[in-house]
Image (cartoon, grey):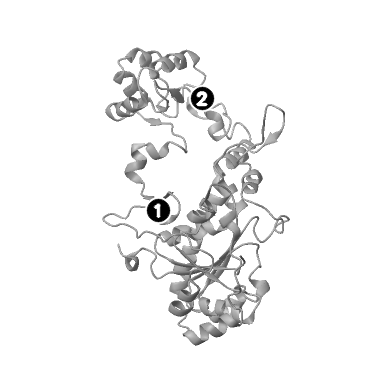
């Protein structure tokens, strides 16, 4: 599809962000929205943060800010603030992805912006949100994982505490929670003519993303005769969520001859299909289990048998068997080798480092019979100053020159 036919073509977002919270608009840009990233004259230092650094620019910048336009404004100047207001007049959304109130301090808060555009949707994204005792604390992404309880401390052989490897939840959950809310705000604004102000803490998103564990603990605070375990476990309570998988047998990881697989025959029908498929019906006859959610928990005798069975075939052979016998078996990949998985290769489009600075996964939504336009490479600081002022705002050359001389766009640091 052309850029004009993209799902979010015609949606204009003004983003004032630094570091990870810029992720909230990445998928918008991927789906064709015009995202104008307003930066300070020195630029967002995300370009130098974290690793890997690719030709002096971080992978994080290449990924999070792809498809966006960079405009530098010195919001300490009256001219810079006026340009910002001019941008907002015909925009749909303003993203304040920094400490809450940063724009308001420059006279560009929601109350100021709705005077020039009553339909504006203003979304503030910050570490801990705009309320609560932690709202003013400085923070980085892993703080939201530790705060929400999604990652626990680990210790090395010398007894020093360290951050264990984990998927960073807060910075990744925020774009999905906030992005959905922003689109809801835009739909309502277009129908009613009234914009709105919303705010989200990355910590909030991390806690919400891990709802199953937290809500399970809340449930277990109630009496045991009210909140029980599964029927298959004799109604005995298991540890919450995936912690309760440790003693599973029919739902468990096993070694294949060349790696690992995940076996998931927790339904009786799938378990029967498995036993018949490998010619071991006696296993089903001895341990038929319950109809649903039966992991044969703690059955070490069966687990030892299955351990030897799964070692007899390669992972690929077990996946083929899964389809043939209609019993759920999945591969166990790593973040490093997943790109070699045939399912990944069939489903994901990769953006090349040759055109986008880094090899990256494109947005994983398929529009039947259509292809999303490729986003542009993440911008350099102020790369689109002239383009935005001329093509978006309609300023002529003399006005642009005057604003430049007045320092409205500032002077980028060396």
Residue placed under numbered mark 2 in the picture: 233
Closer to the eye: label 1 or 2: 1
Horizontal side, residue 56 vs residue 317: left or right: right
Q: Quadrant of residue 338?
A: top left
Check the image and name the residue furthest to the bottom.
398
The label on residue 381 is: none
* Vertical position of residue 254 compared to residue 164: above or below: above
Q: Going from the N terminus, do you reach mark 1 or mark 2 first?
A: 2
Q: CA distance from mark 1 to mark 2?
A: 54 Å
Residue placed under numbered mark 1 in the picture: 354
Q: Position of residue 299 (x, y in %)?
A: 49, 17
Is residue 110 at least partly visible in the picture?
yes
Horizontal side, residue 350 vs residue 155: left or right: left
* Front residue of this view, candidates 214 and 203: 203
Q: Position of residue 256 (x, y in %)?
A: 40, 22
Horizontal side, residue 293 vs residue 221: left or right: left
Check the image and name the residue furthest to the front.
414
Q: Position of residue 177 (x, y in %)?
A: 52, 55
In what quadrant of the picture does the N terminus appear?
bottom left
Q: Quadrant of residue 392?
A: bottom left
Q: Position of residue 231 (x, y in %)?
A: 49, 27
Is residue 363 at least partly visible in the picture?
no
Q: Secondary structure at mark 2?
A: helix
Proximity of marks 1 and 2: CB atoms separated by less than 8 Å: no
């Amino acid at each position: 599809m052309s850029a004009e036919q993209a799902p979010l073509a015609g949606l204009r977002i003004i983003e004032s962000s630094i570091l990870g919270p810029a992720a909230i608009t990445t998928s918008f840009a991927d789906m064709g929205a015009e995202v104008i990233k307003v930066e300070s004259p020195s630029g967002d230092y995300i370009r130098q943060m974290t690793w890997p650094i690719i030709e002096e620019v971080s992978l994080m910048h290449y990924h999070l800010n792809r498809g966006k336009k960079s405009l530098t404004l010195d919001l300490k100047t009256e001219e810079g603030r006026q340009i910002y207001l001019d941008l907002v007049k015909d925009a749909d959304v303003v993203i304040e992805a920094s400490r809450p109130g940063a724009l308001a301090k420059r006279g560009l808060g929601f109350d100021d912006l709705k005077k020039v555009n009553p339909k504006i949707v203003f979304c503030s994204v910050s570490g801990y949100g705009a309320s609560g005792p932690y709202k003013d604390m400085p923070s980085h992404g892993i703080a939201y994982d530790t705060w929400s309880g999604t990652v626990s401390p680990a210790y090395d052989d010398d007894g020093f505490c360290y951050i264990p490897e984990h998927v960073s939840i807060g910075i990744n959950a925020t774009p999905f929670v906030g992005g959905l809310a922003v689109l809801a705000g835009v739909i309502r604004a277009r129908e009613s003519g009234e914009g709105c102000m919303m705010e989200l803490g990355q910590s909030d998103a991390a806690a919400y993303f891990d709802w199953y564990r937290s809500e399970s603990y809340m449930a277990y605070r109630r009496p045991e005769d009210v909140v029980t375990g599964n029927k298959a476990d004799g109604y005995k309570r298991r540890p919450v969520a995936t912690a309760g998988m440790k003693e599973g047998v029919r739902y468990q990881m096993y070694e294949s001859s060349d790696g690992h697989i995940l076996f998931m025959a927790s339904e009786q029908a799938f378990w029967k299909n498995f036993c018949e498929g490998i010619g071991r019906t006696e296993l089903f006859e001895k341990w038929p289990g319950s109809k649903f959610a039966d992991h044969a928990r703690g059955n070490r005798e069966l687990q030892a048998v299955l351990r030897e069975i799964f070692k007899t075939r390669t992972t690929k052979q077990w996946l083929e068997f899964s389809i043939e016998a209609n019993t759920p078996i999945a591969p166990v990949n790593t973040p490093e080798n997943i790109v070699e998985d045939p399912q990944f290769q069939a489903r994901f489009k990769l953006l090349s480092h040759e055109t986008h600075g880094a090899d990256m996964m494109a947005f994983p939504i398929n529009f039947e019979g259509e292809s999303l336009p490729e986003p542009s490479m993440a911008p350099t600081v102020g790369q689109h100053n002239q383009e935005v002022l001329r093509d978006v705002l309609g300023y002529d050359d003399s006005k642009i020159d005057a604003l430049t001389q007045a320092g409205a766009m500032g002077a980028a640091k060396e």
